Image (cartoon, rainbow, N blue to C red):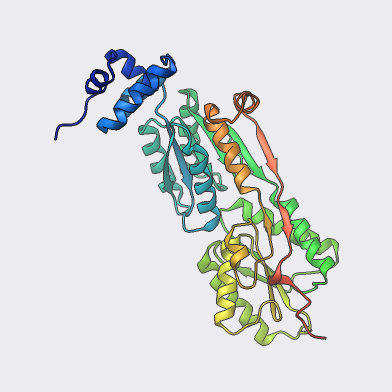
Amino acid sequence: MPAVRLSDVAQDAGVSLATASRVLNGSSRVPGKAVTEKVQASAAKLGYVANAQAQALARSRSGLIGLVVHDIADPYFATIAREVQQQVFASRAQVLLTQTDRAIDTEVRALRSLIAQQVDALVLVGSHRYGTESDTAIGVLLENFEANGGTVVGLGQSLGVGRTIVPDNAAAAHELATSLIVAGHRRFAVVQGIAGIPSAADRTGGFIAALTEAGIEPELDVEAGLTRAGGHQLAARVQEHLAVTTADARLPLCVFAPADVMALGALGELRRRGIAVPEQVAVAGFGGVPDGSDAHPTLTTIALPLHDMAKLAVEWALPDAAEDEDAAAAAAEKPREVHVRGDVLLRESTALTAVGD
């Protein structure tokens, strides 16, 4: 069966080809409601699919957002990707998603590919390291993309281009540590040495700063990847430490993992190794992914406003998607940086009530 053409829709609706094009290809010169509904009804009846290139020419936009994340298996990035998709669902835009596995060269190739697809905006989620030739290449790509009319939005760390939504990682981690100390925790283990992830360093730094202010030194420093597998490594290292430590076992060792995916991995591995949480080891994460509330025990964490972060990113990337005129006007302002704070959620994974005297 031959493909349905725009002219077929126009003939069925009894309108000119130009009118049908204005209705279906996204032109700002849309006919009246009655004509628009008639054309749309004919298109639906005939199964017509609009030509994306024609729509882009009519609107001077492609209707595509390039979304770049580090790891879609990480519930933090998966949650943001889903929120972004939901925010653009009601608009004419579509999301092109790619993951980089935290490889700079992969990110360069991904950005070049997305730009070649003529996306209207690039949304980059996650912190980035600086100082390599590939980083310079990313900077040049983003600067040129913006100079040619594209929009750049970062979630996690300033890119030096466009607009950025930045979690106050150090301050939030400081607040989490303080809350745990107030709750009665005195023994702590922290994750350090995560190369190339500034957000993790900021979180661990803020956490340790609060311990220092309280006169507490971490009992254990662990190097592990900021992944689920890294959480497994963390749990193994904690088990080794518990086997040789002379610290007071009446209080659990409270482990801070600077990402929920790592904390959840540690929870699962500790359980498999027969280590009771929170009786022997308490676990705290960072991010506030939905999986944390479903874990057993439920995960103590910093809950970032992931929905609001994604919503603002889309409003910046696609001002036409803003829900009202005020939001659209705000989205059209000059590039800026917005800081967001998370909420401390003390849950079962760090509860001291289960610890015997």
Q: Is residue 143 left or right of residue 188?
A: left
User: Which quarter of the rendered picture does the N terminus lie within?
Assistant: top left
**Is residue 262 depicted above or below 135 in this figure?**
below
Q: Nearer the viewer, residue 192 or 8?
A: 8
**Residue 230 appears in the figure:** yes
**Residue 51 appears in the figure:** no
**Is residue 85 depicted above or below 37 in this figure?**
below
Furthest residue toward left: 1
Q: Residue at x 39, y 20 (%)?
A: 36
- Residue 156 at x, y = what percent? 60, 45
- Residue 8 at x, y = what percent? 22, 22
User: Which quarter of the rendered picture does the C terminus lie within?
Assistant: bottom right
Q: Residue at x 28, y 12 (%)?
A: 16
- Residue 73 at x, y = what percent? 47, 58
- Residue 146 at x, y = what percent? 50, 27
Q: Is residue 139 left or right of residue 355?
A: left
Q: Nearer the viewer, residue 271 or 212?
A: 271
Q: Residue at x 73, y 74 (%)?
A: 219
